[in-house]
């Protein structure tokens, strides 16, 4: 990852935000986005309850079974 050092004044501006920020240069050209720590997880369209439900859901077939099927096809 590339590291860019900003001025103390700019850092103070970033410290004041709680949501994603579009970062632009002086001409208004977008140069990137800034996501304060802890904000990326809130971008998921799924609720935390739904994510937990999906983590606990066991479905699919065991890898050993899938490999046997693949061996039969060759």
Image: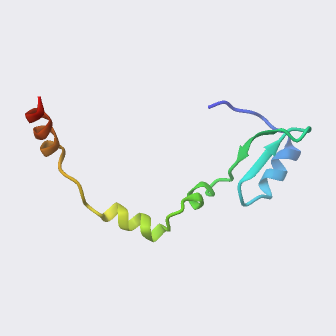
Report the front residue among 14 and 25. Answer: 25
Residue 3 drawn above or below residue 60: above
- Would you identify the image quadrant in which residue 64 lies? top left
Count how many numbered circles sit on residues in the image.
0
Across and down, in percent, residue 21 comes to: 75, 52
Residue at 19% over, 51% down: 61
Residue at 43% over, 64% down: 51
| Quarter that holds the N terminus | top right
64 left or right, relative to 58: left
How are the colours assigned in the image?
Answer: rainbow
Residue 47 drawn above or below residue 74: below
Furthest toward the bottom, the residue is: 49
Across and down, in percent, residue 11 comes to: 81, 47
Residue 69 drawn above or below residue 16: above
Residue at 18% over, 44% down: 63
- Would you identify the image quadrant in which residue 66 lies? top left
- Would you identify the image quadrant in which residue 41 lies? bottom right
Across and down, in percent, residue 50 comes to: 43, 68
Report the front residue among 20 and 61. Answer: 61
Report the front residue among 4 and 40. Answer: 40
Residue at 68% over, 53% down: 36
54 left or right, relative to 31: left
Across and down, in percent, residue 45 comes to: 54, 62
Furthest toward the front, the residue is: 73
| Quarter that holds the C terminus | top left
Furthest toward the right, the residue is: 27
């Amino acid at each position: 990852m590339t590291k860019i050092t900003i001025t103390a004044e700019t850092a103070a501006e970033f410290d004041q935000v709680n949501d994603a920020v579009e970062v632009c240069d002086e001409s208004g050209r977008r140069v990137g986005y800034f996501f304060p720590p802890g904000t990326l997880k809130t971008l998921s369209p799924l609720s935390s309850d739904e994510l937990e439900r999906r983590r606990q859901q066991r479905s699919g077939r065991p890898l050993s079974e899938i490999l046997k099927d693949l061996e039969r096809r060759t």
